[in-house]
Amino acid sequence: MKKLIFTVIFMFFAANLYAGEIAVIVNESGPLTQISEADIREIYLGNIRFIKGVAVTPLHYREGSIKDTFLSSIIDMNSREYRVYWTKKIFQEGGSIPVSQNSFGMIILTVKKDMAVIGYVPISELKETEGIKIIKKIAAK
Amino acid sequence: MQKYQISYVIVLFFIIFSPPYLKADELSDLKTKIDEQQKEINELRYSLDRLKGGGVNGEQMDELKPMFGVNMGIFGDANFTTNSREKAKNSFYLGEVDLYSTGNYGSRMRFLSEIVIEGEDQAFEVDLERVWVEYAFSDLIKLKAGKQHTALGYWNKTYHHGKQLFLTVDRPFFLAFEHDNGVIPVHITGLEFEGSWSYNFAIFKYEFQIGNGPGIDNSHGILVPNNILDDNNSKQIILRITGRPLSVPDLSIGLFGTVFTIDTATRAGVDEKIYGVDIAYGRDRFEVLAEYFRLENSDASGNAFYVQLNYGIIENITPYARIETLDADKDDPYLNSLSYGFDRRQVVAGIKYDIDAARSSIKAQYRYDDTHNGNDYNVFEMQWSFGF
């Protein structure tokens, strides 16, 4: 019975995190291939807008466990904190919150086609990595 | 009829007993076809998005950053207070209605405007609180022109007029807006250069502002930001440098300073210097803010500081406390020209309940407002703020 209660509690708190591995991806011949994890964080927080003179476009996957895992691992925020952060940021400095995409395929394609886009997808979705460089792997939770 | 039944049986026999590898091959072919079709759909979606986005710009996807995009928002608040230094009677009152809009043109130009409608005595006034345009040459050099908040400390650059984003009911008293009897100039009209750069151990940011310095409205004893016309030829200069260690990214430490020339009630052309330090740290549900200001001129000096602490006991309930003080010299021509430029100390304690942290909150706050030689006040305040 105790085990069951602990399992339920664990599942309740773990419910919003993705169980698989996530890859942060960029274009393999773009300016983002050498960036650090701190740079990824700063890009998604809107504090770094340019890399080597090129305007960077961060992409999110839609709301859900994959985005939550990315936010907690890289940005160290939950989705509520991230939304409040951007509400303040836009009010202070203008700009807009990073765009979200509904399909992994679109994120992968956009990264392949655009030198300055950064995104993240489950590694299981990366069947072809031509044109793409994985710059960070987020381990399964 | 029997003929048909026999042929069904034969077909079924072949389906059931056909070699499994044939089914696997078919499935594999089918999957490849679906993958190819999915790719084609993605390519078509991508092309469609590019067409919708207003054109192709080499290697940049401008459709993800619309050529011209505008956000609009409103902040507002409704309040109740027992009698205080600011409100002589127990009162319900309207705070500010803050209409703001931000826009961008491509990836380098941004705009922001903030218009506030607020109660002044028994009437409402409309103020243009911020309006600026920015061009980003790079992360190291961004140039802004217009009216904005002075880079004097953390609070003034982080919180503007939207009370929804405040933890407390109001700003620290010495950082109040000019017409609310603040003693630090919080608006400037002019230019700002801003940029950030990172080293191995920290990320640094600088903000350099040059613009019209404040004046003093001697009939009301308040600072006046010279938005339209400066009242002297010297310009106010402000510099703030902030550092965030990479090992503790939630900590920021800032150093700031300003110089300006101002005509006070007792002496013209006072060269006023204000400088100080700010520290902000926030992690999980804990946050601490602290700022110290030193005000100096050739005749006297003053000090002001606040420390604010909060810890969210659960996700949407945050108790907080703040102490804030101003020590003024009685010979100070600058502070003595301001009606609230006297020694004062406040202790604030309250609780904020977030209905939705970005959209609406309710705050209940106790404030002990103490001066050396004047009346002291025990004030109970409530605020319901919103933003959308």
Image (cartoon, grey):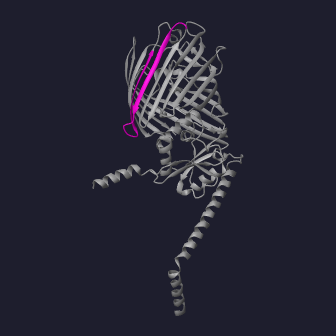
Q: Which quarter of the picture shows residue A92?
A: top right
- Residue in view at x 57 percent, y 40 percent: A43
Q: Does the segment drawn in magenta span residue B309?
A: yes
Q: Is residue A33 left or right of residue B385?
A: right
The number of numbered badges drawn on the structure is 0
Q: Position of residue B312 (x, y in %)?
A: 39, 36
Q: Is residue A125 above or below residue A85?
A: below
Q: Nearer the viewer, residue A85 or A26?
A: A26
* Residue B32 point in image, percent of width and height: 60, 66
In the image, what residue occupies the spot 65% across and 54% down?
A: B46
Main SS category, magenta section? strand
Q: Which residues, given as a range, are shown in magenta?
A: B298-326
| Residue B42 x %, y % | 63, 57
Percent across and percent down for residue B167 are: 44, 32
Q: Residue at x 53, y 8 (%)?
A: B333
**Residue name at image x 72 percent, y 46 percent:** B58
Farthest residue, direction left: A1
Q: Is residue A93 above or below residue B235?
A: below
Q: Is residue B356 magenta?
A: no
**Can residue B90 be seen by looking at this rendering?**
yes
- Compare residues B289 and B165 and report the one nearer the observer: B289
